[in-house]
Image: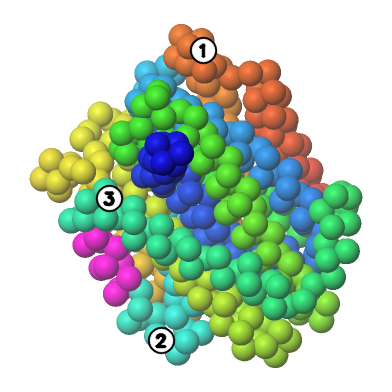
């Protein structure tokens, strides 16, 4: 009996030691852009986005599973595989698209930090430089294990959103109905938010980050089941649950009182008189934690991708002298993100939503590459994609393209309401 207990305990310890990439990717998905998109969805359209969130989360989980499998099977990052299989030209297109999306996301998350700090009375001109410097020094001189543990700790704070929604006292019957029964509006604002929803839920950085982190963590083919379980559990329990409760909190309070939000901190501030100080506090703390987590992850993802594309040394276990391009990319994005947010009079919220729309347009391109790679027998061997995965991935790309075309048609026709 004791021997059996020890075996179970050992397996649990092994599992806990290997978690990180999937959990950080899923929770990191709820950054300032995610919070802005989810808050706007709840505040402007009530519970009607809940069914969309469920469908997109299934797509996200399948796509992240493909990336995780490629990481453990090949021991290579996504950009490495794209360069080897499709050549330099396609790699250049992908890295440029990713860099644009990530730069916009860094700016939006710096804006999230600024908004969160200003809620508590701290000027962005003090807070943003302090955060940027702290992230810079930790990424430059911290080891992989130290950084991963700090990020996991920050990610736990984001769970505040679950509590904030419960405090708001939603109509759970209506929540269930709107989750199971689709409702669609063919309007400019609705479709733009759908695209932004895709961009923040299946964010381009996530697809690169999880695979690079799996490689950097040293997971191999013998860890494939653990890596895949972590992806599935993290996607539904972390990404879906947090986004789900952000929408509920805002729909229950802001939508009911027809309050629109125009800044990343508006949602938290507006919740205070409607749902009380506790809901306000939990929402504001979640905004700060989620944005700070993303400021670590986004520059890191870009650095991995740049090094994989051009063959430079990279990784958190490398020193700055061993990987100058890796750390130089991180420094550049932190500087640009901080500088843009500190420009006088800049409006952050439209920029945040735009960043998610840009990501939503780029996502289908990346999903095509990932599906082709994960479906390649020579690369994946017996871990090649099943028909189910190919159908989900193909349906995701088709859905995004169709919504984008309809949205573009509304813009060109002048029908913006």
Please name the residue that numbered disc 2 is placed on.
Answer: 122
Q: Secondary structure at mark 2?
A: loop
Which mark is first along the chain, 2 or 3?
2
Residue 385 location, quadrant: top right
Q: Alpha carbon of mark 3 to alpha carbon of mark 2: how far?
A: 31 Å
Q: Secondary structure at mark 1?
A: helix
Please name the residue that numbered disc 1 is placed on.
Answer: 382
Snapshot colouring:
rainbow
Residue 174 in the image: above or below residue 179: below
Which mark is first along the chain, 2 or 1?
2
> Which residue is drawn at the image coordinates 15% and 48% (left, top)?
320
Q: Main secondary structure of the magenta part?
A: helix
Q: From the top left corner, tell me how far across and down residue 237 is, in percent.
A: 61, 52
**Range covered by the magenta-colored residues:** 129-139
Q: Residue furthest front?
A: 1
> Which residue is drawn at the image coordinates 70% and 78% (left, top)?
167
Q: From the top left corner, tell me how far across and down residue 201 is, in percent.
A: 61, 49
> Which residue is drawn at the image coordinates 31% and 34% (left, top)?
218
């Amino acid at each position: 009996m004791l021997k059996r207990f020890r075996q179970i305990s050992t397996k649990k310890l092994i599992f806990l030691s290997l978690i990180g990439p999937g959990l950080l990717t899923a929770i990191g998905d709820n950054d300032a852009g995610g919070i802005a998109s989810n808050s706007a969805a709840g505040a402007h359209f009530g519970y009607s986005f809940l069914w969309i969130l469920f469908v997109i989360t299934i797509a996200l989980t399948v796509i992240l599973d493909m990336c995780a499998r490629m990481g453990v099977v090949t021991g290579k990052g996504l950009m490495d595989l794209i360069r080897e299989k499709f050549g330099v030209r396609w790699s250049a297109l992908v890295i440029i698209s990713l860099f644009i999306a990530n730069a916009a996301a860094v700016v939006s998350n710096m804006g999230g930090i600024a908004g969160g700090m200003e809620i508590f009375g701290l000027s962005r001109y003090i807070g943003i430089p302090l955060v940027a410097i702290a992230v810079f020094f930790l990424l430059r001189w911290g080891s992989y294990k130290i950084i991963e543990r700090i990020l996991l700790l920050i990610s736990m704070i984001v769970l505040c959103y679950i509590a904030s929604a419960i405090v708001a006292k939603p109509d759970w019957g209506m929540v269930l109905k709107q989750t199971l029964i689709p409702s669609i509006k063919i309007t400019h604002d609705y479709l733009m938010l759908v695209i932004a929803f895709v961009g923040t839920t299946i964010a381009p950085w996530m697809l690169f980050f999880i695979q690079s982190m799996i490689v950097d963590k040293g997971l191999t083919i013998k860890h494939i089941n653990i890596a895949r379980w972590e992806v599935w559990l993290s996607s539904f329990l972390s990404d879906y649950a947090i986004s789900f409760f952000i929408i509920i909190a805002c729909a229950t309070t802001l939508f009911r009182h027809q309050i629109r939000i125009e800044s990343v901190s508006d949602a938290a501030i507006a919740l205070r008189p409607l749902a009380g100080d506790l809901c306000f506090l939990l929402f504001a703390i979640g905004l700060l934690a989620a944005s700070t987590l993303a400021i670590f992850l986004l520059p890191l993802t870009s650095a991995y991708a740049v090094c994989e594309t051009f063959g430079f040394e990279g990784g958190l276990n490398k020193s700055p002298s061993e990987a100058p391009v890796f750390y130089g990319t991180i420094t550049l994005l932190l500087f640009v993100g901080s500088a843009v947010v500190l420009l006088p009079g800049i409006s952050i919220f439209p920029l945040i939503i735009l960043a998610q729309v840009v990501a939503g347009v780029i996502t289908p391109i990346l999903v095509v590459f990932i599906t082709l790679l994960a479906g390649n027998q020579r690369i994946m061997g017996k871990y090649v994609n099943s028909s189910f995965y190919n159908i989900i991935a193909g349906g995701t790309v088709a859905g995004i393209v169709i919504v984008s075309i309809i949205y573009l048609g509304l813009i060109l026709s002048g029908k913006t309401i």
